[in-house]
Amino acid sequence: MSSVLYDVPGPKAKARNWIYTAVFLALFALAAWWILSVMAEKNQLDADKWTPFVTDGRIWTTYLIPGLLETLKAGAIAMVIALPLGALLGMGRLSDHAWVRVPVGAVVEFFRAIPVLMLMVFGSAFFVQFVPAVSSDFRPLYAVITGLVLYNAAVIAEIVRAGVQSLPRGQTDAAKAIGMRKGQTMVHVLIPQAVTAMLPALVSQLVVILKDTALGGSLLGLTELLATNRQISANYANTIATLVVIALIYIAVNFALTSFASWMEGRLRKSKKSTGTVVGVDDVNDMATGASAAA
């Protein structure tokens, strides 16, 4: 017995899968036990290293919450700028005009090839040399946003290009048949249909933007979430516990982002199914008549 995508496993395959699952769980439990035992030997499981996150509110109000807000601010600004910029670059790569397509392609490939951390360093040096009006207090934030926007806009451009090219060729042909120009076809026909297909990749890239803000904290002095580890560890001497709590905060924030995107994707798919129209023979004849008149 088989389905469209894969062969349904038989009794022996199911038994092997159960064995593999049991072996993996046993190995995972053994690794977790070993890690916890090593931490206990190093006194990393002592209550005094973990209770400050419950008993001392200053650790949240002074360090973690301000750091999280700085992370969210840098990530949100970078997302708001990178998304439309990446969409424009993606449409530019699909242009029929070589004088548009070639330079845009060069820009996209250039910024995709440079590490985002290097772009942040260049951004910081640029603000120091050419924009002295930006104070040193805001320079790390501006540099981080600049690096994130340049790199992720190039990546989003490739996501848009791949999403549009994944659509059937008939969509473009139908738009041309009713007299739509290339720009109208892209904006009103191709992009709206490609959004659903692009959404998982776009959400993954948004998660990358949020996590890459930590690079600015490690090198440029941005007071984001991960950078608060240094202050907390210096005051409470609980580096491992602090890193675990910060990791859990990152997981919670990114899980909320992906859950929202999954909900939005479901709404988009449902709306497309519920608002779909059926084109009849008379509609085809009217479209053909309109195309002939336009010609």
Image (cartoon, helix red, strand yellow):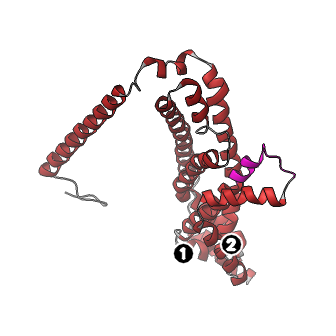
Which one is nearer the viewer's eye here, 230 or 262?
Answer: 230
Residue 31 at what x, y percent from top left?
Answer: 28, 37
Residue under the point 61% across and 61% down:
156
Q: Residue furthest top?
A: 55
Which of the 4 image quadrants contains residue 154?
bottom right
Residue 62 at what x, y percent from top left?
Answer: 67, 26
Q: Amino acid at mark 2?
A: Gly
In the image, residue 45 sits, relative to residue 196, either above or below, namely: above
Residue linked to disc 1? 169
Query: Can residue 22 be seen from the camera position used here?
Result: yes
Query: Can residue 83 be seen from the camera position used here?
Result: no
Query: In the structure shown, which secondary structural element does the residue marked by tag 1 occupy?
Result: helix
Residue under the point 67% across and 44% down:
221
> Quick check: 76 left or right of 3?
right
Tag 1 or tag 2, which sits nearer the N-term? 2
Q: Quadrant of the N terminus?
A: bottom left
Q: Which mark is residue 92?
A: 2
> Quick check: 200 left or right of 2?
right
Which one is nearer the viewer's eye here, 253 or 61?
Answer: 61
How many tags in the picture? 2
Let me know if residue 136 is in the magenta part.
Answer: yes
Q: Which residues are magenta?
A: 133-145
Which one is nearer the viewer's eye here, 186 or 285?
Answer: 186
In the image, residue 89 sits, relative to residue 102, either above or below, namely: above
> Quick check: 23 left or right of 291?
left
Let me know if residue 14 is in the magenta part.
Answer: no
Residue under the point 58% across and 17% down:
56
Q: Residue furthest right?
A: 133
How would you rate the neighbour count of disc 2 (Cα within 10 Å): few for under 14, some for 14-19, many for 20 or more?
many
